[in-house]
Structure formats: structure tokens, C-alpha cells
Amino acid sequence: MTTVQTKPAVAINRWSRFSTSAATRRATLQSVVLVVVLLVLPAVLSSFWIQILTSVVIYSVVALSLALLMGRVGLVSLCQIALLAIGGWIALRLGFATGMPFPLLLLATATITAVVGTLIGLPALRLSGLHLALVTLMAAAAITQVIQAVNFPNGGPGFLGYSPAAAGSVAASVERPALLASDAAYFRVVVLVSALMFLLGVLHVRSKAGRAWAAIRQSEMAAVAAGVNVTVYKLWAFALASFMTGAAGCLLAASTGGLTTYAFPTQDSITLLAVVLMGGIFSFWGPIVSGVLLKLLPEVLKNWGLPPDVLTILFGIGVLQAMLTAPEGLAVQIPRDLGNLVRKVSHSR
């Protein structure tokens, strides 16, 4: 007996094949980009630019943490840069005090930072929007002042681990394993760890937690009526974002040059918010664009001999453009505009 396939079934099958092919193309593109970044870039770039790209990748993870809070949960946090400094401080303290292996140090730093970030996120249970942004900004300012007062650990005695006598001779940086001594090898490890952080974000967004976050973002009262435990899932979001930022802080503490007390000014939290909005808070490519804007673009402009004020002007124009014409960010707008351009050119022929 032959079966007749109805039109809805045919349409479903076609859509399934289309979705599968689109997912395959995305996975292929991501794999190609990862291979190029891991193998090609370290082989063709100088040590200086490898260090810059290492910073780009690390700050992409920080941008990812903020994008998850804003784009998926609707929470505006302005203390991610301060949490990055806390992650670096914890990594240095544990590194000098225990000498634990680098993978274990990375995990411990991320976990402790997640606990600290969850405590900072407690006001999110009752605040939102501008009020939450102001509270987290004040927390960031307080953390910055504390770190400037106690300084980063440099192997000194006591809990703080800072010795003024050793400030000029001992760099505040985590000692890398022998396999990661070169900048190229460390860059590859940073890319792999960052890829794991992005994968962790993707898995959360596609899980029950992601659906709960989407409900909270749309309407907190409706989420409560639907049975969503708003308290748990808000704190979960802050813990995840802080875990990612703590891992980035550990990676930054082991990068070339180490950490200084003036590397994390409070105004950088505002700058991070601007570049995350420009890059896109709804796409996982957005944080990568944000990392490029935050760390690569300033070095390119400096290399061209342009004054630093040009960057501030560009960021201001970019935020206005993103808010008015491209709320989804450059990561979504540019591919869409290029696709429209290609279609128009092909139709004109």
C-alpha cells in the first residue's frame, strides 16, 4: 500500500531539511573560523598582535557574560569589569599561595568569582532596569577602590599577598605551564577556553534555564504566573555570567604583562556596555564583535596615528546607530545588509 504525503507534511519535511542544512552551514563556518584562528593567525602574526588578539578573545568572554544578562534575562549589570578584576585577584592569590595546576586554578577562580558575582546580583531580586544598573555601577566603583588600596598579589606574605618591596621586581601575573610559555601557545589555549565558555552559554540558552530567562525578560509577572522560580533563575544568570568573567580574569592574569591596579577603571564598565550594545546582545557573534571593538580597534587607530578621542567619537556614533537603526547589533546587521546587497546585485543582472 502506498501512502500519500499531505501538503503540510511535505512543508514540514522541507522546513526540516532547510533547518538542518542551515545548522550544518553554521557549524561548518564556526569550525573554519576556529581552525583559522588557532592555526593560521599565530603563524603569520607578530608577538605584539598575538598579545592583542589574546586580549580580544578574553574580553569577548566578558562581553558574552554581559550579553547573556542583558539579551537573555533583561538585567543590566555594570560590574563585569570589576568582576574581571576580582577574577584576576583571586587567580593571583591562589597561584602564589598554592601553586595548583593551571586548569584547576582556572576552575577554582571561576567558581569563587561566581559566588562573589551572585552576592552582588542579590539586588537583582528586587531591582531592574536603571536602578539595577546604578547599584551594580556603585558596586564596581567600590571594588575598584578596594583593589587599588590592597593592590594585586605579587607573592608577598599574608592574605593579601602583596609586598611593596617586591612591587618593582615581581610582576603580578600567574606563572604559565611550560607548554604555554610562548605567546602563540597561550593564545591557542585562551581561544579553546573561550570556545568552551561560548559553548556553555549556548547550552544554557537552549535548555530549561534559557526558556525561563526568556520568560523573565518578556514579563516577570507572567513568568511567576507560569511557575518560573524567578529568584533561582536570576541568581543562576548572575552566577553563570560571573563564572565566565572569573575564567576570563584568570586568563588575563596569566597573559603577558600581568595586572595593574589602574587597568580596570570604573568607566570601562560603561564602555563595555556600549560595545556590547553595538556588537549585539541577541547573537553569540555579538560578543566577538564587542571584543574586537574594545581591544583591537584602539590598537589599529593608534597604529594609524589617530588620537584616542577618535575612538570615543566612534563609540558614541556606534551606540546611536545601534539604538536607532540596528537594535540587534552589528553581528546581525552587517550579514543581513550584505545579503540584501548581494540579492539586489544578482537581481539587477
Image (cartoon, rainbow, N blue to C red):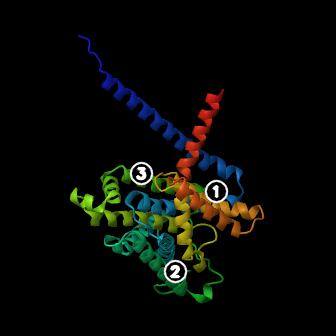
Q: Closer to the camera, 61 or 153?
A: 61
State which quadrant residue 335 falls in.
top right
Secondary structure at numbered mark 2: helix
> Which residue shows up at 58% across the image and 80% down it?
261
What amino acid is at disc 1? Answer: Ala
Quarter occupied by the N terminus = top left
Residue 172 shows which numbered tag? Answer: none
Give the number of the disc on residue 144. Answer: 2
- How far is disc 3 from disc 2 in space, using C-alphas? 31 Å
110 in relation to 184, above or below: below
Q: Secondary structure at mark 1?
A: helix
| Most foreground residue, 26 or 222 | 222
Q: Position of residue 282 (x, y in %)?
A: 46, 53
User: Could you tell me how far apart the alpha carbons at marks 1 and 2 are, in whole angstroms?
Assistant: 31 Å
Q: Are marks 3 and 1 in contact (CB under 8 Å)?
A: no
Q: Provide residue 73's location: percent of width, then percent of height.
A: 37, 60
Q: Residues within 10 Å of mark 2 (few under 14, many from 20)?
A: many
- 139 up-or-down from 313: above or below: below
Please name which of the two marks, 3 or 1, marks the residue nearer to the observer. 3
Left or right: residue 63 compared with residue 294: left
The residue type indicated by label 3 comes to Val
Whichever of labels 3 and 1 marks the residue nearer the N terminus, that label is: 1
Q: Relative to residue 65, is residue 184 drawn left or right?
A: right
Marks 2 and 1: in contact by CB < 8 Å? no
Q: Secondary structure at mark 3?
A: helix
* Number of marks in picture: 3
Q: Earlier in the sequence, mark 1 or mark 2?
A: 2
Q: Which residue has dot 1 on it?
A: 184
Depth check: 74 or 49 in front? 74
The residue singled out by tag 3 in the image is 202
Q: Quadrant of the C terminus?
A: top right
